Amino acid sequence: MNKNKYYNIITYGCQMNEHDSERLAGMLEEMGYQHTEELADADIILLNTCIIRENAELKVFGKLGELKKYKRENPDLIIGIGGCMMQQDEPVDEVYKKYRHVDLIFGTHNIHHLPNLIKKIEETRERVVEVWDEEEGLIPDLPSQRDSDHSAWISIIQGCDNFCTYCIVPYVRGRERSRPVNSIVQEAERLAEEGVKEITLLGQNVNSYGNDLDNEINFPKLLEALNKVEKLKRIRFMTSHPRDFSDELLLQIKNLEKVANHIHLPVQSGSNKVLKEMNRGYTREYYISRVKKIQAEIPEAAVSTDFIVGFPGESEEDFEQTIELVKELNFDMAYTFIYSPRSGTPAARRDDQIDEKTKKDRLKRLMDLQNKISYDKNQKLIGSTQEILVTGPSSNDPEVYEGRTSTNKICFIEKNKDLIGELVKVRIEDAKSWTLEGTVI
Ligand code: SAH
Ligand code: SF4
Ligand code: F3S
């Protein structure tokens, strides 16, 4: 065993990567390693990387450079790098050749091999590279070391088959693979027994859940099965692809009492021309009608979205269509991104790329508009009663506690240790664009 040995994992990217890091941590803990916040004390440092946009990559290379000093101070330190960036040849070559202090390179399809890979390095002290193109057979359920006692992620479907023309995910996460329903329900039951109140179901496109399985299961039916898990209080999920957001799913969200009133439905653009070139599989009109139906059926639900500005060929008129869509749909929240060409994707090969200044200008216009809408929407909540799951001290101010509403809005409350992990009713006293303030009632 590795008594008195320590690890640290640095994670970039989305919730799927965060969850993979929990599993990497789970395996290291089973090997006897303990977590440390201090990189200088670590015997193993792992980087779990993201390649979705260029700035994600730049951050990783910056961090790798920084880690060199720890290796100099402690030559026995094992530095490993895994995740989506390592599923692409170019960054693997660059890390292997230019960052000699890296001992281990692994991919997204072989994280369950981590213990073997580490043992190999410990025994031989040689550099190890193991990146699989795809998974081999059924991957075992892995232990996971969670940050929170009360909320947990559950992976329900891996990979993506959509091939949006800007996106690297299908290349680095492979084809869609749904996890068997029994294994998901059993994990939810186990977590609920351990005190978890809220689960978040993860997948690049949760609406495709079950398409690749033989039985009749689909995502709405999975929600129904999970809604029956006693002791579980809330079920969240992300991400929904608008094309596959069915009426059946809408009704389940409305009728199943544990399913949270929050739908993240990335639209990307308001222009039909751009949507087509992105290969999103829906039109502006279809998207608007979907959101309007959600708003009519579940008026209390929050809808959030993602936008990409500056996709190749996006004209001022195309962008204005996005602005108009935002005004029409009143999203609760939006993540806005500047288009970043990703090597190997069709959109990156186009010769009508948009200049940086135009992209930044469009981003600002869109963000200013959405911030105002989010602010106005949150202001309307002042005086209302909301139920929040209290998670503990806020990361910005430990003297204040925070929790999330069913609609996924962050709400600050007074410090009170007894409330951690509890669902409590609060009266909303104040509101900003991204956060609420409340008093417990
Ligand atoms: N599977 C989800 C989200 C995947 S990535 C979905 O289909 O919606 C999260 C977000 O990153 C995307 O919604 C998109 O807005 C953004 N994104 C993906 N690739 C990008 C790129 N090349 N440049 C800029 N933003 C990108
Ligand atoms: Fe990327 Fe599109 Fe798949 Fe989302 S649906 S992960 S944006 S290819
Ligand atoms: Fe997620 Fe980034 Fe990979 S967004 S799936 S960690 S490329």
Image (spheres, rainbow, N blue to C red):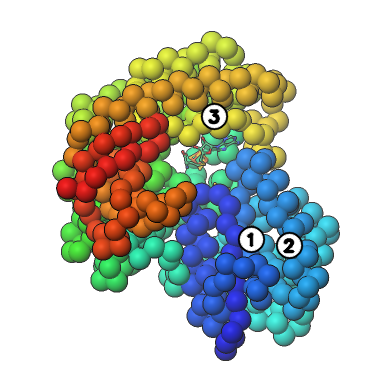
The amino acid sitting under disc 3 is Ile
Mark yes or no: residue 385 visible. yes
- The mark that comes first in sequence, 2 or 3, is 2
Depth check: 143 or 12 in front? 12
Name the spot of residue 19 as percent of width and height, x first: 47, 59
- Seen in the picture, residue 106 relative to 293 is either above or below; the reply is below
Whether pointer 1 and pointer 3 mark residues with C-beta atoms closer than 8 Å, the reply is no
Question: Callout 1: few (<14), some (14-19), or many (20+) C-alpha neighbours within 10 Å?
Answer: many
Name the spot of residue 316 as percent of width and height, x first: 57, 12
- The mark that comes first in sequence, 1 or 3, is 1
Q: Which mark is residue 47?
A: 1
Q: Which mark is residue 158?
A: none
Q: Secondary structure at mark 2?
A: helix
Q: Secondary structure at mark 1?
A: strand
Question: Callout 2: few (<14), some (14-19), or many (20+) C-alpha neighbours within 10 Å?
Answer: some
- Seen in the picture, residue 99 relative to 348 is either above or below; the reply is below
